Image: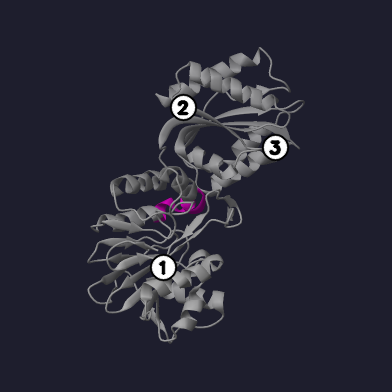
Amino acid sequence: MEKVTEDIVNIGVNDREITLFEGQYEVEKGMAYNSYVILDEQVAVMDTVDPRATAQWLENLDEALGSRKVDYLVIQHMEPDHGGSIMQLVERFPDMKLVGNAKTLQMFGQFFGVSPEDKAVIVKEGDTLSVGKHTLQFFMAPMVHWPEVMVTYEQSEKVLFSADAFGKFGTRDADEDWTCEARRYYINICGKYGMQVQALLKKAAALEIRTICSLHGPVLSENLEYYINKYQIWSSYEPEDEGVLIACASIYGHTMKAAEKLKEMLEHKGAKKVVIADLTRDDIHEAVEDAFRYSHLVLAAASYDGSVFPPMEDFLNRLKSKNYQKRTVGIIENGSWAPTAARSMKAILEGAKSLTFAEPAVTIKSAMKAEDAAQLEALASELLKAQE
């Protein structure tokens, strides 16, 4: 357990055993499922936890409650990593009220096969609930990143319970930089919904916030401007850093040699930052994260079956699904008899907003040769011109 304030306790659980979150995201340092209890004249619990952590969470809750009972469960998000222990709490406290919005009620039935109407307190935008000296105010946050999501502002201690917003991969006590894993979390999970996140940030800007309590990661209570600014950047799809990500999908290594040569040229010409992601071996979600982080992207891929090598196709489809935009993109294609990668990569990104393709596209036939250096040099110059 972790005290947030004198009356608010984080009773969440650090899951150190999980290695794959949502069945796809590698979490080397585990995952935190946060849940909070407000101890006042009445007791309110803010969300539950993943079923993997139910037993430990209930122990934490019992320790925080002592002999008291829970009066309200506020359900901000029905996704199973937060709503997965709701019924266990309902069984323990049958008189407990369930606080949510109309969409919460609908999803409740979908997950649990019962209607909570006799226990439900349905709230709308701006509604309040007093539990004593603490007053909870509710703000709807649809599609951040599910349609029923809402956040809760505790008025007396200026605490924002932010649902999944401002969350990160890793346990609360993971020894790592917040920004890297929060960025990977945001881009891959919430990244498609930048407009909706912007709408939530506008609501938050009207509140005096001293503490942010997310459902994942640490409680944030210092330098909040830094975290909020990161969310402004990420949700507006602006580049976070000037730099070039070279995303490479190479079959036998020839395309990778071209990518490495381009990196060498860019660095020699004074590029601020150049990173290569090997799409056949590296974590695809980190590559997606870096594509959004940096101002420039180079796609280097082999042709395959009249199209493009599947690891690149997967990467580009992920970018497109997360609303990739506002970047300069360079292309290196390889093909032994009929290069098709460039055409295929552009086709996948067709319709993406505000993408500028750097010319010339580089075409390599099989292995990179001395005469290909001039093409790479021209592409490097064009990318750096676009950085100015």
- Report the span colored magenta: 188-196
Looking at the image, is mark 1 or mark 3 nearer the viewer?
1
On whether residue 67 falls in the magenta region, the answer is no
User: Is the residue 150 above or below the residue 40 in the image?
Assistant: above
Q: Amino acid at mark 1?
A: Gln
Residue indicated by mark 2: 273
User: Is the residue 32 above or below the residue 77 in the image?
Assistant: above
Residue indicated by mark 3: 309
* Residue 6 seen in this snapshot: yes
Q: Amino acid at mark 2?
A: Lys
Precedes in sequence: disc 1 or disc 3:
1
How far apart marks 1 and 2 lie (CA) works out to: 40 Å
Determine whether label 1 and label 3 are within 8 Å by CB. Answer: no
On whether residue 191 falls in the magenta region, the answer is yes
Pick the residue in front: 9 or 306: 9
Residue 161 spot, x, y in % from top left? 35, 62
Precedes in sequence: disc 1 or disc 2:
1
How far apart marks 1 and 3 lie (CA) works out to: 41 Å
Residue 36 spot, x, y in % from top left? 38, 67
**Is the C terminus in the top left, top right, bottom left or bottom right quadrant?**
top left
Residue 311 spot, x, y in % from top left? 66, 40
Q: Secondary structure beneath disc 2?
A: loop
Residue indicated by mark 1: 76
Determine whether label 1 and label 2 are within 8 Å by CB. Answer: no
User: Is the residue 42 above or below the residue 50 in the image?
Assistant: below
Pick the residue in front: 370 or 32: 32
Q: Residue at 33% of width from left, 54% of height from top?
A: 201
Q: Residue at 41% of width from left, 46% of height from top?
A: 178
